Image: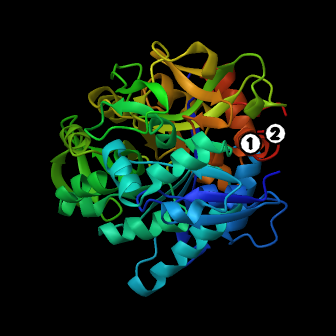
Amino acid sequence: MLKVRIIPCLDVDKGRVVKGVNFVDLVDAGDPVEQARIYDREGADELTFLDITASHEDRETIFDVVRHTAEECFMPLTVGGGVRVLDDIRKLLLAGADKAAINTAAVKRPEFVREAALKFGSQCIVVSIDAKTVGDGRHEIFTHGGRNPTGIDAVQWAKRMTEYGAGEILLTSMDRDGTKIGFNLPLTRAISDAVPIPVIASGGVGELDHLVEGVIEGHASAVLAASIFHFGTYTIGQAKAHMKAAGVPVREDPKT
Amino acid sequence: MIERVGVIDYGLANIRSVINAINCFPVEVFVAECGSELESADAVVLPGVGNFRSGMKALRERNYEECLNKLVIEDGRPFLGICLGLHFLFDASEEGGESGLGWVEGTVRRFLETPENKVPHMGWNEVEIDDSPCLFTDLEPPLDFYFAHSYHVPLEGVAESIVTAVGNYGVPFVAALERDNLHAVQFHPEKSQLAGMKLLENFLTVS
């Protein structure tokens, strides 16, 4: 049976993790490679780096982070943030990333997703969607960290991105991000039920029950969280045990 | 004994992860960019993500087909195909016009999408093994590996004797096969943490 993936996410700025951490055994708490190593050891099913570096000159650092992580962590790596042209994706893959997440560039020019999927294969193209529920129960796409409304309906957009060859959707509930009150479940379910590709739920996780809800009620194929893992509130192992107890299939460490 | 491992680069796949993983073992890894460069390899790894047709076309353009036929089929050097590298061994694929290497009889098919089974088949899934095939030596169930693919080899129509691990995603499919020196897996051992690393170690030591 296909397992539900638990994906920790690291926000990286100029090669450093920006959110605070309190892993006990970290020498350098800001080093993304070291944190990746810990998540790998804990049995994370996949890892996402979100590169929030604004300036182009500092972009090179994310390639180094990916390169060093890929040298010692043997789990799937997704990198998002600032992916604008095909060459950005190629460089990420050459550094060792398995998937690239495209967000603003897709909204600006949807054909970019089609071109990327044709060139690199759907399995490595993730379309990242930031959405909120607007007044009338519709779900709308926002860009620039949730500040700019686009008028685009999130469900229609997800379907269109699937047709263009996206292999996965990383769906962030913008109205929940950082709130710790759980995913926007109606939004998550609306998109998960509308597309034939996997949906990763993100945004708002504060409790382990939220992860379970994202799967059972939101119909997500995978769940992503940042702060509950960064701040050491819960370990990956605790998240897995909790999901397993709730009847969600998770991967357990192999016996060797 | 395997000392030199040649990893095939046909210009389309991400081969970095495979090289990183093999580098954890006491062997020398080198990247071959065309068929003739493989000659000195004790073992050959064919990784693959992407599209069957463009992948096979690139393999032919770089003169790998003839060379692989000689090294793997005639000389019997250990071979490991990964993901698309498993698909290439078959006659053909629904994914496109180019014929495969034809080392194994069968056709690669697309998964049917259902609400329960989204496509691509993406993530960790269990495989069933029988008789402890050599790639799975010292690995005990439950055995989860990382998959990322939309096409698969249906179990039906493939000689039972060569199928060593079976996956299930709506339909049973070939997760691993072994025939003498020929090994191939549908999942990504280089992305499957401990279980994947053990499998690679097995390939390098017991195959």
Pick the front one: A57 or B168: B168
Q: Is residue B61 left or right of residue A231?
A: left
**Residue B193 in the image: above or below residue A187:** below
Category of crowding for the residue at label 2, using alpha-carbon neighbours closer than 10 angstroms: few (below 14), some (14–19), many (at least 20) = few
The residue depicted at 25 percent of the width and 38 percent of the height is B97
Q: Indicate the colouring scheme.
A: rainbow
Residue at image mark 2? B206
Q: How many marks?
A: 2
**Amino acid type indicated by mark 1:** Phe
The quarter holding residue B185 reads top right
**Amino acid type indicated by mark 2:** Val
> What is the number of the mark on residue B203?
1
Residue B80, can we see it? no
- Is the C terminus of chain A in the top left, top right, bottom left or bottom right quadrant? top right
**Residue A105 in the image: above or below residue B167:** below
Category of crowding for the residue at label 1, using alpha-carbon neighbours closer than 10 angstroms: few (below 14), some (14–19), many (at least 20) = many
Image location (x, y in percent) of residue B44: 63, 51
Contact check, label 2 and label 1, Cβ < 8 Å: yes
Pick the front one: A142 or B150: B150
For disc 1, the chain is B
The quarter holding residue B11 reads bottom left
> What is the number of the mark on residue B130?
none
Image location (x, y in percent) of residue B151: 39, 31
Image location (x, y in percent) of residue B95: 30, 36
The quarter holding residue A10 reads bottom right
Q: Element at badge 1?
A: helix
The residue depicted at 56 percent of the width and 42 percent of the height is B81
Pick the front one: A93 or B38: B38
Q: Residue furthest left?
A: A151
